[in-house]
Image (tube, coloured by chain):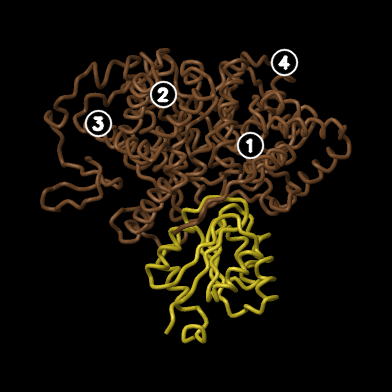
Amino acid sequence: MAFTQKKTAATTGISESASGHPVKPLYVAEDIEGLDYSEHLGDPGEFPFTRGIHETGYLGKLWTMRQFSGFGTPEETNRRYRELLSAGGTGLSVAFDLPTLMGRDPDDEMSAGEVGKCGASVACLDDMRSLFVGIPLGEVTTSMTINSPAAVIFAMYLVVAEEHGVSWKDLSGTLQNDILKEYIAQKEYIYPPEPSMRMVTDVFSFCSDHVPRWNTISVSGYHIREAGATALQELAFTLRNGIEYVEFGMRSGLSADQFVPRMSFFFNAHNNFFEEIAKYRAARKLWATVMRDRFGATDPRSLKLRFHAQTAGVSLTAQQPYNNVVRTALQALAAVLGGANSLHTNGLDEALSLPTKEAALIALRTQQIIAHESEAVKVTDPLGGSYYLESLTRDLEAGAVEYFNQIDGMGGMIPAIEQGYPQREIAQSAYGSQQAIEAGVCPVIGVNRYVDESKQTVPTLYIDEDIADQQRERIRRLKSTRDSSQVVRSLDELRRAAKGRDNLMPLLLEAVRANATLGEICDAMRDVWGEYEETPFV
Amino acid sequence: MRKIRVVIAKPGLDGHDRGAKVIARSLRDAGMEVVYTGLRQSPEQIVGSALQEDADVIGISILSGAHNHICPRIMNLIAEKGLEDVLVVIGGIIPDADVPGLQKIGIEGIFQPGTTMQVIVDFITDNVRSERKTL
């Protein structure tokens, strides 16, 4: 395959990208020989959607400016959301704290020191209410970055939407709900793969009946890339995860066209400008082809890969942090030129802390400058036809297909994960890129080039410790005032259902309405399914 | 002279293990013997591993902001088990404001974002107890 780790002679003028892709000094017509316009590219809005899923690109609708945000109490996070929306943000994206991501209450022993630190603490229905006070849930779309306990948090959101008087039929937004990349990269998993996949497909099926405009999953390459993967590995593992979800969805009795249209994706926007643009284009083409040929999907919406992008957190430097504004702007431009449907731009201070209000605002302004000043949005897929870009797109696609075949040969993504295959591939790339930075082979301004010994400091956000006390107190109060017999009954029913095969969503809704906490609900399922543990390796 | 033995530990609920794994490999490549505990280890498990492995160094990786809760518990256990001659270092997202507090409880190396592997290797080599270097 064209993506290899092999070194190329300096004398040929061929260099190598961070992904190990040979890069020539010039691309000419013969580099895209055999590329057929209608077969490999197609007009925007037409199969295989290499050039975009919308006929009119961004002229019809700009991408959603969706800034991932959350810290401290639900009330504090709610204030940040209102600030972002009044500054021109066009969607919300909830960051939950680690106890929430791991299905534990603030008063759990394992939550000590973690409450509200990396995101908002949301442990009960009342927390979810506070998070969205004064926000029109029928108009603003909300994305929720939660995976193992995704179905529980979704149930809380559905109840709050109902209380706002918004019909589930009109509700739109995204649940990350991508457990496979947790086993592979981010490692916020609770249960073993089998029951975890069942929860994912329960959400697919429930939404296809009751919440038809909801994106039931955001198959995420972002975390895979942040963990160290190359652009090719990000592309290949993410789409192969997507294939795994489609297989499980169909195995649960759904037809592809019943749930694939509501699947969405999430990619990183990293430093190598052209490679990133090519990655998004290759992703669209691969998905359309695989859905049609492997799964027989016919609904055009099943073939169109929609994606959110986020600039690369890992590329931000603690040294000379103001340079991060420029890095982020270039990465965001790559996402836009690659046709992102939704975008998050990182704050300049995020190597050091969650972003301050000021840093978050500059990040949003960066998107607005691209959207309204650069005129990059006036032409759809403006780089389509470039010898270099098309050749890169084709190479990435071919590289991804090789990875697909390898993982198919292992029996699918779950067996591959159990063998530690994607984890090792990623760890190897992470180590390689660290070595390349330390050896100065991979230039990083302010780190191994143009180093400035005087420490440039920026203000950072500090999360107060007393947030944990407030959240613990809230849970204590809830537990002393709710009808505990109803809680016990709903959790018993949930345990019983977890042992069987019925869709869990109605039971989760019932438990949430009874004011069972996130920790209690997740514990009920832990009782039945146990917990997943990976074998550590270096 | 025996190799320097290091336990790399990842306490708390966080699963972001890129840093822990990269540092573990870097220390191994620098000639040290490295044990990586895996994720979500309690302070008891971490100190237990150090004891069992006869570690010269404990390296803690925390990115989540839980260091002010976790580190004192680890340091208390270290004192309890009489492991004061073990060098303790931490890497992760540690705000400047928290550095003095961590130093005060006996954490000698505090590696904030942007630290190179070489700095960490050199720090450990220079600061591991000399009586242990010649064990």
Instruction: Report which residue position mark 2 lands on.
Output: A305
Q: Is residue A92 above or below residue A451?
A: above
The chain containing the residue under callout 4 comes to A
The quarter holding residue A122 reads top right
The answer to whether tags 3 and 2 share a subunit is yes
Q: Position of residue B92 (x, y in %)?
A: 53, 58
Name the secondary structure under disc 3. helix
Q: Position of residue A297 (x, y in %)?
A: 41, 16
In the image, which is nearer the foreground, mark 4 or mark 1?
A: 1
At 60% from the left and 31% from the top, the residue drawn is A199
Mark sitting earlier along the chain (3/2): 2
Tell me the CA gap for discs 3 and 2. Answer: 17 Å
Instruction: Report which residue position mark 1 lands on.
Output: A149
The chain containing the residue under callout 2 comes to A
Instruction: Report which residue position mark 3 lands on.
Output: A394
Tell me the CA gap for discs 4 and 1. Answer: 25 Å
Tell me the CA gap for discs 2 and 1. Answer: 25 Å
Amino acid at the residue labelled 3: Arg
The reply, left or right, for residue B62 in relation to residue A61 is right
Instruction: Report which residue position mark 4 lands on.
Output: A165
The chain containing the residue under callout 3 comes to A
Chain A is which colour?
A: brown
Mark sitting earlier along the chain (2/1): 1
At 49% from the left and 74% from the top, the residue drawn is B5
Dot 3, crowdedness within 10 Å: few (<14), some or many (≥20)? Answer: many
Name the secondary structure under disc 2. loop
Tell me the CA gap for discs 1 and 3. Answer: 37 Å
The chain coloured yellow in the image: B
